[in-house]
Amino acid sequence: MSEREREALVGEGAVAYREYLGAVVLHGQAAAEVLGQNPTDVYALNVLALSGPLAASVLAGRIGLSQSATTRLVDRLERAGRVRRVPDPADRRRVLVESMPVPAEEDERAFGPARRRLGEVFAGFSEDELRVLFRYFTQAAPALREAAAETRGIAPQN
């Protein structure tokens, strides 16, 4: 493939990628509505579910909010029964934020349609194609977090 052909392909891919990101954001908003939360709350819950309990200051860095905004977010999620504050087992003076499981029926309403539809998409890929796709997800996530931090002019928080 020539450099010109590669640039054209990447350009086409950029359009598809922007459409994909828009769809991800749209789905995040829809899922948040079903859960009675806002998209930032759902994003924070996802970060906590994937990482386990975090100090509020660490959560703030991971989700790109100030510490005061994160404190308000945690207060809101705690009132909604979505998180709880727990003592840090390594330092009982410190408090961690821990996500609570989403009830199965709420999870199904919020995320079931996407799981099913994406399952249909994945069914059309070979095992090798899935491995490439999942490698992309694994490598792109930290790259996008670093880009977000760079855009904000702050140090990346992976």
Image (cartoon, helix red, strand yellow):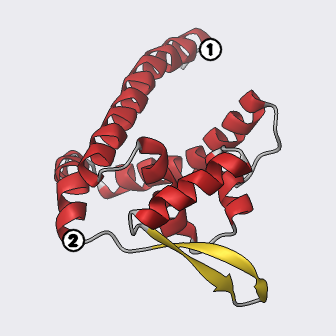
Q: Which mark is residue 3?
A: 1
Distance CA(mark 2)–CA(mark 1): 49 Å
Classify 136 as above or below 84: above
**Nearer to us: label 2 or label 1:** 2
Badge 1 amino acid: Glu
Query: Which of the 4 quarters of the picture holds residue 27?
Result: top left
Please state if 120 lies on the left or on the right of 140 as rendered: left
Badge 2 amino acid: Ala
- Counting from the top left corner in percent of width and height, residue 114 is at 23, 48
Classify 17 as above or below 59: above
What residue do we see at 64% from left, 56% from top? Answer: 71
Which residue is tagged 2? 104
What residue do we see at 17% from left, 67% from top? Answer: 105
What residue do we see at 17% from left, 53% from top? Answer: 116
Q: Which mark is residue 61?
A: none
Q: Work out which quarter of the rendered image holds the N terminus and state it.
A: top right
The residue lying toward the viewer, choosing from 155 and 35, is: 35
Q: Residues within 10 Å of mark 2 (few under 14, many from 20)?
A: few
The residue lying toward the viewer, choosing from 102 and 93, is: 93
Residue 127, can we see it? yes
Please state if 82 lies on the left or on the right of 122 as rendered: right
- Disc 1 element: helix
- Disc 2 element: helix
What residue do we see at 63% from left, 52% from top? Answer: 70
- Counting from the top left corner in percent of width and height, residue 125 is at 27, 48
Q: How many marks?
A: 2
